[in-house]
Amino acid sequence: MKLIVGLGNPGERYKNTRHNAGFLFTDRLTGKSEIPVHTDKRSFAVVSHIMLFGQKIITAQATTFMNESGTGVSMVMEKYGIKNVSDVCIVHDDLDLSFGMYKIQQGKGPKIHNGITSVEEAVGKDFWRIRIGVDSRAQGTYVSGESYVLGNFTEEEKFQLNDVCNRIYTSAEFSLVVGSN
């Protein structure tokens, strides 16, 4: 069984922020309105079960804040008996990539991302990562990374993010990650 976890911050305040790109991807993946979703208080996550590429998949969004994502990921892995960290795929925002870009990699991540650091400390580093680029800051302007990722997507970025999610979902790399045993 595979586990796909979208990282983000819980609550209405953060719903449309760049830091919640992972949540937005898993929402699209589950078709949120069509798939039963439940909050699993023991796992600190909102969990869905879907079939994807012929595989049973658990999707989750940690209900902890981003910097404590490892707690939610490790609890979901424990509850569902996922022992192999390479059966886990973490989807997250990445300021090292320009907006509209993405990378699917195993064991490699951004230079600095507190959510990923938390997951690595909790379960190890060999999980798959879908890194969604969110950096669209204008040249010559300075906005701290923290302030920028906690800012809301613009309307144009929301439109582009839909395209990025579709490109990821239909990519050969994604089908290999989800379908591999």
Image: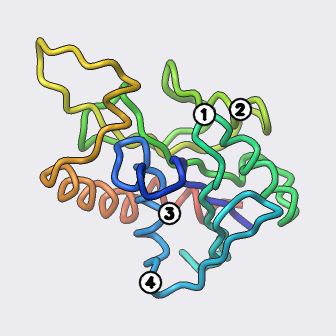
Residue type highlighted by circle 4: Ser
User: Does residue 165 sit above or below 36 in this rendering?
Assistant: above
Residue 175: assigned label? 3
Residue type highlighted by circle 1: Ile
In which quadrant will I find the C terminus?
Answer: bottom right
User: Does residue 26 sit above or below 74 in this rendering?
Assistant: below
Contact (Cβ within 8 Å) of mark 1 with mark 2: yes
Identify the residue shown where x is 52% and y is 47%: 9
Give the Cα separation between the discs numbered 3 and 4: 23 Å
Q: Which residue is nearer to you in this view: 64 or 129? A: 64
Give the Cα separation between the discs numbered 2 and 4: 31 Å
Q: Position of residue 121 (x, y in %)?
A: 76, 29
Q: Which residue is nearer to you in this view: 119 or 141? A: 141
Give the Cα separation between the discs numbered 1 and 4: 28 Å
Q: Which one is earlier in the sequence, the residue at label 2 or at label 3? A: 2
Identify the residue shown where x is 33% and y is 18%: 144
Contact (Cβ within 8 Å) of mark 3 with mark 1: no
Q: Nearer the viewer, mark 2 or mark 4?
A: 4
Contact (Cβ within 8 Å) of mark 3 with mark 4: no
Q: Which residue has dot 4 on it? A: 33
Q: Which residue has dot 2 on it? A: 120
Residue 116: assigned label? 1
Q: Position of residue 32 (x, y in %)?
A: 46, 77
Q: Position of residue 129 (x, y in %)?
A: 55, 42
Q: Residues within 10 Å of mark 4 (few under 14, many from 20)?
A: few
Q: Which residue is nearer to you in this view: 62 or 50? A: 62
Q: Which one is earlier in the sequence, the residue at label 3 or at label 4? A: 4
Residue type highlighted by circle 3: Ser
Residue type highlighted by circle 2: Glu
